[in-house]
Amino acid sequence: MTLKSNQTAIVMLGASGAVGTETLQALLQEKYISRLTVLGRTPIPNINAAFVQQHKISIFDTASYQEYLQGHTAAICTLGVGEPSKVSKEEFIKIDKTAVLNFATACKKAGIQHFELLASVDISSKSKSFYLRTKGELVEELKALNFERLSVFQPSMILTPTNRYGMAQAITLKVWPLLKPFLRGGLRKYRGIPVHVLGQAMAKNIFKDAKAYEILQWDQFYTTAEKE
């Protein structure tokens, strides 16, 4: 079942990143949003929709945005370090875990019912990988907040139309799509996902009628993005 209500009010953190940009653009095309609040360190240019409000905040200080959360029904968080290998572990935790958890806690306090998170495939609080373990620990803490609905998006390689991070990403963007025929069955979740499809899925999932905790991976990205 799909929810169609013009009472849907969404607050978003992380709209300037690759996935956040696509999610925001998809949301701007929706007809059933009463209010879309975009929080960030710098305003997103060229947004003229009357239902959109933007606020400049500090992602590390909940006091800078707590008042802007009131009256929303859903939150979308695509905040994260673009190249985790380029920052210290402490900085990665500060942005990808602490800032996100603080945002989610503030959302829960404000009465927000549905929280969406951009995470990664194979995250686990028991993983030997620092990156995957940190993300997994975050999700466990988000689950403990007991949102009415918690949606965790777990992409593998996110395929962007342009190379944002140098030679390594350029090679990956060329090679990863070629692996698709070999990633079958339980390996389907490792297929690369075009960033615009992921953004569409995060936007349209808001309007699905669902409860509790859900994990969305490659197959769900496509079925949700195509759902009207």
Image (cartoon, rainbow, N blue to C red):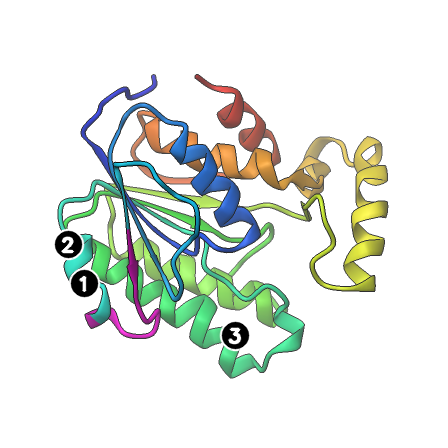
Say which residue label 1 marks: 66
- The amino acid pointed to by label 1 is Gln
If you read the primary sequence from the N terminus, does the residue marked by circle 1 or circle 3 appear first? 1
Say which residue label 2 marks: 110
Q: Which region is colored magenta?
A: 54-63
How packed mark 2 is, by other alpha carbons closer than 10 Å (few <14, some 14-19, many 20 or more), is some
Q: Quadrant of the C terminus?
A: top left
Where disc 2 sits, the SS reads loop
Residue 144: image location, x then y, percent = 28, 57
How packed mark 1 is, by other alpha carbons closer than 10 Å (few <14, some 14-19, many 20 or more), is some
- Side of 181 relative to 44 (left or right): right
- Side of 126 relative to 52 (left or right): right
Q: Is residue 124 magenta?
A: no
Q: Label 2 to label 3, Cα distance in Å?
A: 26 Å
Q: Is residue 57 magenta?
A: yes
Q: Is residue 66 visible?
A: yes
Residue 165, image quadrant: bottom right
Q: Label 1 to label 3, Cα distance in Å?
A: 23 Å
Tag in front: 2 or 1 = 1
